[in-house]
Amino acid sequence: MDCTHMNMNHYEKQLYTVFKTFDVDNEEALDKSSVQELCDALQLEDRGSALVDSLFERRSGRVTFTQFRNGLLSVLGGGEPSPLPSTAPAAPPTHSDEDSSGREAAPKFVFGSKKYGRRSRPQHVASDEMPRPRVASDSRLDGERSRQRMKCKRSASVMESRDSTAFEDTEDVAGDLDHDKRVDRERALSLCRSLQMTGIDRQLVDSIFESMPTNEITVGDFFDRLNASLTTSIAASLGGGMTPSDDVPLSSTEKELDNTVPSDAVVEVWERAGVQRPRRLLVELGFSTASVRPLDLERALDDELQALLATVDGQADPRNLLFQASLALVRLRLELSQQRISVAIAERDKLRSDLSEANRRACLLAQDVDENHARIEAELKASLRQVEIRHSEATRAAAVEVASERERAAAVRARLEEEVSRRTDIEARLRADVTNLHERVKDLETRATAAEERALQAERERARLAAENKAAEESGAGAAEASRLVASRLEALVDELRLENKSLRDRNDELCAALEAAPLRPCGMRGGVNDGASWRDESALDASLPRDDRSEECDSSSLSMDQNAQRDEAIKRLQSICERVRELSSSMDGKCESCSTVTRIVATIQAGVLEMGETSSQCVETAIQTEACRCAEATELAETLESTKRTHMEEKSQLMGVISELESTYEQLKLDYDKCEEYWSTKLDEEREIFNEEQRAGDERLAELVNKIGEYERQFAQAALPTIDERASLELQVTELEEEFAKYRRDKEAELAARVEELARLRRRLDDVERRTPLPNPTTCSCACACACGGACGCAGACGGVRCAAALRARAGRAERAAQRLAARLAHADLLVKDLYLENCRLAHRPRLP
């Protein structure tokens, strides 16, 4: 039932809702009493009883919704109940007005600020003519509805599961109503017979298939063409009527549908016309079927008349009988034509009234649609405004959050940039320090290289000196041997010189003695002196020679080969000098000056030899000291170089550690910066995604809201065929209200005038009383009452006059207040009449839909 309920149209759903209100047991079926109550609720009246009888004629239990709907459609269509499911509108919006024109319509209902509905039925054209003949397939052959019905492919067996055996034929027919199924002539004719279309004969089906190029046609196309053919024939019969001339040929459809009358009707007309034995005459004319065509019958009678005119005179003239029959037939045709014309006129008037009602209904629908659209648009605008406000608030909050997040990100970025700049400065400073240290290292390396070169040079010098020292030692040993040899030669030479000197001294002594013995005394004295000097010189020379030998021995142990050569040369010079001395001494025996000179020269030579020995020893010592100093300096330079190397390596290792630490710090900072940048980019992407998600969610909520508004609009929309609001009735109500208000106004104005007159009269009486009776003094009155009894009577009269005046004043006040209330009520009624008049003018001047 749920699937079938989903396939229902709007009217079937309304009818199903009304049907379910009477299904208290929720059995999807109603008994006879419930069906009668449902028919009363649908205001079917006589058709309701016919529907109940048709539904419960063959069954005594319950009736399902499908059975009730099919029976209702059959009753409203004027035929027998059809088992075929249809998508025609439900009963409430399509009930007939002819059967319920005298009763009161449904009361008005209020939706919003407008009242809809009517209290009376529209005035229809009263006619006693027979209604337009209804074609059996008129409600089934509408193009769009039949196409939709065929496409739905719904079977009545779905909703009639409890009575499936009773509707097997319906299921077969529904299976044949496939919109795309192709049928031939026989199948199409059988389909029309199964749908109880008794007015469709083979000739009409053949005319439809003759217009097709093939012998087969789809079911939907067949029913469309059948509907068009029937509509054309009906329109021609209603519009043109019967032509008085027989020259215009009629179509087969007209002959079949419009010009066919029952043979019993012809027989009855002939009997009323006085034709004898009319049925026999009809059979003799060749019409033995249940229905005859008046045109064929007229032609047959004309043929008989033509034949009778050719008979021989003198025989019985049967033309009177034929003339009577023709006259009766013509009258019958005239009556039928008049009936069709009256039906056409009634249908025309009905169509005009329906058109005006449709126009008014369209105006009302347009007004309702405009109001609904305006209301929905206002609600939608309000909801959109609220959504926009919430969206703007969310946007502002998101913007504030994004701004704060951006500020925090900017602060963090500035801090990170400061840190990066600081670390960059540190890195630059460290790089400068590293550069300086590299320069220092290069300088130290240069200095170390130079020191190493100097050390190598000193090492080479030391090795050379060691080699020279070794060579000197070796040469010293050889020189010692040579010096010993030389010393031995010198000793031999000295011995020879001593011997020679001794011989010279002896000779000198001899010479001295000879000189002493000579007679020349002065010469002897000089010779003695010179002899002494030369002895001293020789002694000195003898003393110096051994010293020379010793110095030579000392020098030979420490001088180099060059010094030995110089010494040899000096010795040779000394020897040459000694030889010259000897020569001089031998040549100058008696000259003291030459001896002294020789002695001095020998002494000088000895001193030079001694000095040369000392110098050579000093040179050797200086060389040794220089060699030691150079060795110490080389050792010190090597130690300094090693210490410098160690210091440089330590400093280099420290600098490499600092550089590696700075590089690791730089890498860490770079990683932190990359992580920070990636984090903020991810954060921004997440925020963008969140914002986009919120925006999409807002759009989805807005779309859902629009869909809900559309659902509410469709849910609370009025029915497609609402009750007709007759403007004439509304104007009549307004006119009656105006008349009633005018009457009420006249009455109230008359009453007000009477009260004003009464008030004026009371005022005049009050003035007269006040003039006649002056107001007494209360003290005087009391005194008079206390003093005299006669005065008491006069005082009582005065008090009565005062009370009368007070009562008159009270009545006048009440009358004034009543007049004010009446004036207020009149003003309120006047405003009400003005509002009603404006509403009437607005309704009257609303543009009508075409």
Image: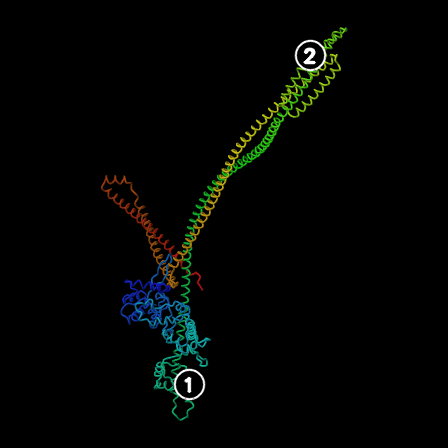
Quick one: quadrant of the C terminus?
bottom left
Where's residue 278, x and y in %? 35, 85
Q: Which residue is mark 1?
A: 302
Between marks 1 and 2 in the image, the one whose residue lies nearer the viewer: 2
Q: Earlier in the sequence, mark 1 or mark 2?
A: 1
Of 53 and 323, nearer the camera is 53
Q: Quadrant of residue 478?
A: top right
Query: Looking at the picture, does residue 804 appear above or below residue 129?
Result: above
The residue carrying pointer 2 sits among few (fewer than 14), some (14 to 19) or many (20 or more) residues within 10 Å by Cα, namely some
Q: Residue furthest left?
A: 789
Whole-percent x, y for residue 292 in the image? 38, 81
Q: Taking the image as drawn, is residue 568 in sight?
A: yes
Nearer to the camera, 562 or 737 = 562
755 in relation to 523, above or below: below
Mark 1: secondary structure: helix
- Please say whether residue 603 is visible from this viewpoint: no
- Residue 844 as seen in the image, left or right of residue 755: right
Q: Quadrant of residue 220?
A: bottom left
Q: Position of residue 133 (x, y in %)?
A: 38, 74
The amino acid marked with disc number 2 is Arg
Give the SS element for disc 2. Answer: helix
Placement of 10 over or under 632, stated as above or below: below
- The x, y position of residue 223, in whole percent, is 41, 72
Q: Farthest residue toward the bottom? A: 314
What amino acid is at disc 1?
Asp
- The residue identified by callout 2 is 536
